[in-house]
Image (tube, helix red, strand yellow):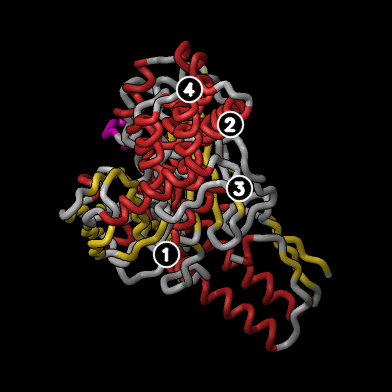
């Protein structure tokens, strides 16, 4: 409130001074809780931010999943009663536990190895080293197939063709024909390079014609999200629910992509002539996005991809900001590295680092620091982090974390129950007693227990004494503020006779015990 900062009021004259005196005397008779209730953040004020807190990832996978989930719960508990902030939760589908393949992992290194093997195979084929070409083409194909649904099918078809050419050159016609058939089934419209021998080109075209004349196979695809796009061997063939009866029999690669988000459901399928295969794609958008985010963060990498997937989740539940990060072992304790993502601005702001000791004695203060820093940055980030960036630049390697492992620290962390700070508890009680009364609530750093057995949240004599001290302090605050208003009224009334103005300075003590100076 304005009277509790340094103010300079101009010289009051006439009725203005009398009005000031009457106002001061009137406010003196109003309990402080009522005056505080009229603060700008009263009930009905617009929400400043809607916050989604994601589970923290275990950096290098050295901590149990429960550590990251519980860290998020700690933070939610601490900021749960903060003013102008609303927490939201992700909505998981009822059948999410049965999802078999929500988002296959993409391994860029394997895809790069496949490309390199294909280049080496083609070089061996051009040089007439057909045995080496077969080995390298086979490696390229196996690596490419392992990365479904990220296969580049034109490359895969060319690799089968190269394998067939090398086999024919070695006199292995049956093997060569089999590889040609694989290529023709993947893409019956593929045209061979004119540089190949005509006899080879004719054999391929005859094989393609024979495949086209075979009885067709069918597929019926349904998905938990209707309208999802269906791809077969890289070509879109419709949307779910889908029925097709004109497909080439054999091994194919099915991919189902919902319109919303970028989660992919995929698996190889075997189609049989004259039969229709039934496939149900159970797609969990939330689980798929969380899996991708956790995979990146656990590698100590906060990338643009993570920001985009987190933003997708946030938009799904109407969140304006997302908190995410990672946990790792450090110096016998557990370190928490957090970031605040603005969905609108796509800025990523680093937050205060928390370090939990093995006994969790300072856990309450550590969580408070993260929560307070988070709330202060909701209005904007002065130094946003450029992506990609490490989640925790100082996180020890996997080997180093293994040497720091402390089973007692993990047990203490999982057993610890974080309670909201004292002022938050009072706000919760006031809300229960006076549901319609507007009030302010903010974060206050909890006092760490220093007596053995006085863990935060426990009912101990130490905590009862603290509550009594807090009640006495609140009473003193009310008394001090009442006398403050009376003093202001008297000083203002004196201005009628003497003129001048007063300076009230409480900048060093916001509890109302400031100094008043009169300047004639």
In this view, the residue in front, 434 or 490, is: 434
Residue under label 1, please give it: 318
Percent from the top left, x then y, of residue 253? 34, 47
Task: Give the number of the disc on residue 349.
Answer: 3
- Residue furthest to the right in view is 520
Along the polypeptide, which appears first: circle 4 or circle 1? Answer: 4
Query: Mark 4: which secondary structure?
Result: helix
Q: Earlier in the sequence, mark 3 or mark 4?
A: 4
User: Closer to the camera: disc 3 or disc 4?
Assistant: 4
Residue depicted at x 53% and y 25%: 133
- Residue beneath label 2, please? 122
Can you tell which mark lies on residue 343?
none
Q: Residues within 10 Å of mark 2 (few under 14, many from 20)?
A: many
Q: Is residue 462 magenta?
A: yes
**Element at badge 1?**
loop
Q: Is residue 236 above or below residue 125?
A: below
In the rendered structure, which segment of residues is drawn in magenta?
A: 458-464
Q: Nearer the viewer, residue 492 or 472?
A: 472
Residue 390 seen anywhere in this rendered image of the structure: yes
For the C terminus, the image quarter is bottom right
The dot on residue 135 is 4
Residue 447 visible? The answer is no
User: Callout 3: few (<14), some (14-19), or many (20+) C-alpha neighbours within 10 Å?
Assistant: many
Query: What residue lies at 78% left-to-right and 75% top-to-bottom?
Result: 10
Which SS class for mark 2?
A: helix
| Relative vertical location of residue 373 with respect to residue 117 in this rendering, above or below | below
- Count of marks, rendered view: 4
Task: Name the secondary structure under disc 3.
Answer: strand
**In this view, 480 is above or below 25:** above
């Amino acid at each position: 409130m304005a009277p509790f900062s340094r103010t300079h009021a101009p010289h009051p004259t006439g009725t203005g001074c009398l009005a000031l005196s009457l106002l001061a005397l009137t406010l003196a008779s109003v309990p402080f809780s009522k005056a505080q209730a009229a603060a700008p953040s009263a009930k009905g004020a617009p929400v400043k931010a809607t916050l989604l807190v994601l589970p923290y990832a275990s950096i290098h996978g050295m901590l149990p999943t429960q550590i990251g989930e519980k860290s998020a719960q700690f933070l939610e508990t601490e900021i749960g009663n903060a003013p102008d902030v609303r927490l939201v939760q992700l909505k998981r589908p009822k059948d999410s536990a049965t999802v078999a393949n929500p988002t296959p992992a993409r391994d860029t290194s394997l895809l790069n190895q496949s490309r390199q093997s294909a280049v080496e195979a083609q070089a061996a084929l051009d040089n007439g080293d057909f045995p080496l070409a077969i080995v390298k083409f086979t490696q390229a194909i196996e690596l490419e197939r392992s990365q479904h649904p990220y296969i580049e099918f034109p490359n895969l078809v060319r690799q089968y063709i190269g394998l067939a050419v090398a086999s024919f050159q070695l006199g292995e016609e049956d093997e060569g024909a089999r590889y040609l058939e694989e290529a023709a089934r993947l893409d019956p419209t593929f045209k061979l390079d004119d540089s190949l021998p005509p006899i080879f080109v004719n054999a391929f075209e005859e094989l393609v014609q024979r495949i086209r004349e075979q009885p067709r196979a069918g597929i019926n695809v349904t998905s938990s999200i209707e309208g999802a796009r269906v791809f077969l061997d890289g070509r879109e063939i419709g949307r779910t629910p889908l029925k097709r009866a004109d497909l080439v029999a054999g091994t194919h690669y099915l991919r189902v992509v919902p319109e919303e988000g970028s989660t992919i459901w995929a698996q190889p399928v075997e189609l049989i002539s004259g039969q229709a295969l039934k496939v149900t794609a159970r797609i969990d958008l939330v689980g798929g996005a969380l899996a991708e985010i956790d995979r990146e963060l656990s590698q100590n990498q906060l990338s643009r991809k993570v920001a985009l997937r987190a933003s997708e989740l946030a938009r799904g539940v109407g969140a304006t900001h997302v908190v995410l990060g990672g946990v790792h072992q450090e110096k016998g304790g557990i370190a928490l590295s957090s970031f605040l993502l603005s969905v609108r601005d796509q800025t990523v702001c680093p937050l205060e680092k928390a370090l939990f000791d093995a006994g969790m004695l300072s856990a309450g203060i550590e969580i408070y620091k993260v929560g307070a820093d988070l709330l202060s940055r909701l209005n904007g980030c002065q130094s946003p982090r450029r992506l990609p960036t490490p989640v925790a630049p100082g996180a020890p390697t996997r080997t180093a974390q293994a040497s720091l492992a402390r089973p007692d620290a993990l047990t203490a962390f999982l057993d610890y129950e974080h309670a909201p700070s004292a002022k938050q508890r009072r706000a919760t009680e006031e809300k229960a007693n006076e549901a319609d009364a507007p009030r302010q609530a903010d974060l206050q750093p909890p006092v760490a227990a220093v007596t053995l057995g006085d863990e935060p949240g426990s009912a101990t004599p130490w905590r009862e004494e603290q509550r009594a001290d807090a009640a006495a302090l609140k009473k003193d605050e009310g008394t001090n503020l009442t006398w403050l208003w009376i003093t202001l009224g008297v000083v203002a009334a004196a201005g009628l006779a003497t003129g001048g103005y007063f300076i009230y300075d409480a900048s060093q003590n916001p509890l109302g015990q400031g100094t008043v100076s009169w300047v004639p």
